[in-house]
Amino acid sequence: MAEIIFGSQDGAAAPPTLEAQATAIPQTQPAAVAEAPPPNPITAIATRPDASVAQNTFVLGDYVPEFKDIILPRLNIAQALGEIGKTFEVGTLVFGQTLALWTPPIFDKKTGNPIRAAGPPLVICCLGFRPLRYVEKVQGGGGMIVNSEDEVRANGGTLDYNEWKLKKAAGMRRFEYLVDAVIAIKRPDFIPDDGKTFVFPIGTDKYALGLWALKGAAYTAAAKGFFNTQRRIGCLMKGYPTFHVYVTTRMKPFKTPEGGDGEAQVPVCMPAYESSPEFLEFAKGVLSSK
């Protein structure tokens, strides 16, 4: 799987401490004239941190942070269990924990008749993936994340569901695959074009950049079932950014470790259309950025 790395693995790198070196304005001392005015702060020059620079200087100018110094917003699926599912309809695609980009249909539980139709599919384009990691499966999330299968074993875990089922009573941990997709999201028509979220104009459309964490059933459905497969034998053979993708969600039933019935929302991905030359130039610029 191709990968793209923007800063730290958890996307939460602390911003660097920035300092500035002031450029002094020469002062003259004409006879019988009051002291010259202090240096104009507008002439301060922004620089990288330097031990020789005084700690009380400041930054002016148009400093643009690198990708490693920012936190990209994430695309999530609202689940019945989880904080996002408390605010949004289960199955909704939510960006940045606040913006609903796709809503599922609603049916009358008694008659089965539709009450509300689903929204138009969300359109995204995958630009690449961060390196594969492994996350401990814990009720409600928040499990340990490690970087290799050796680390899974070293922490008393396994990726094999059947092995975990046999040994969980002895304390074995269950881990799943986890990968972050770096995505460009096309602004849906119903989202106001206010320049707040979708800030990258490409042709007649606007896009936002974000991350999409795929793990467990979502990893199987989207990463393996669509992106990996299409990259090898389908519409993404020329590269992830070369084709746009429709994304919705569906409910998937499953058996719990105790033998009961459960269900969770999983992504549904389908080929949309080829990316435009303008979009490919945009993607090239993102992929070459630090």
Image: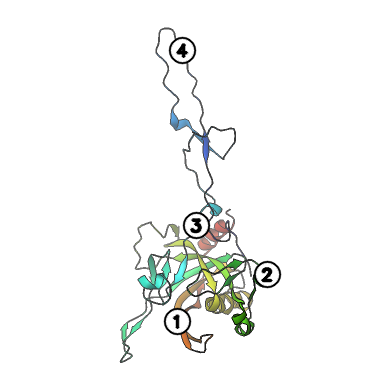
Regarding mark 1 in the picture, which secondary structure is present there?
strand
Q: Which mark is residue 250?
A: 1
| Amino acid type, callout 4 | Gln
In this picture, residue 200 sits left or right of residue 190: right
Residue 138 location, x and y as percent? Answer: 52, 74
Q: Which residue is mark 2?
A: 154
* 3 or 2: tag closer to the N-terminus: 3
Residue at the image point whose x is 46% and y is 81% from the top:
264
Q: Is residue 148 above or below residue 251?
A: above
**Residue 275 visible, this orientation:** no
- Look at the numbered discs 3 and 4 and tell me whether their residues touch, using CB distance below 8 Å: no
| Amino acid type, callout 2 | Ala
- Look at the numbered discs 1 and 4 and tell me whether their residues touch, using CB distance below 8 Å: no
Residue at the image point whose x is 48% and y is 36% from the top:
58
Q: Which residue is mark 4?
A: 29
* 3 or 4: tag closer to the N-terminus: 4
Q: Is residue 279 above or below residue 116?
A: above
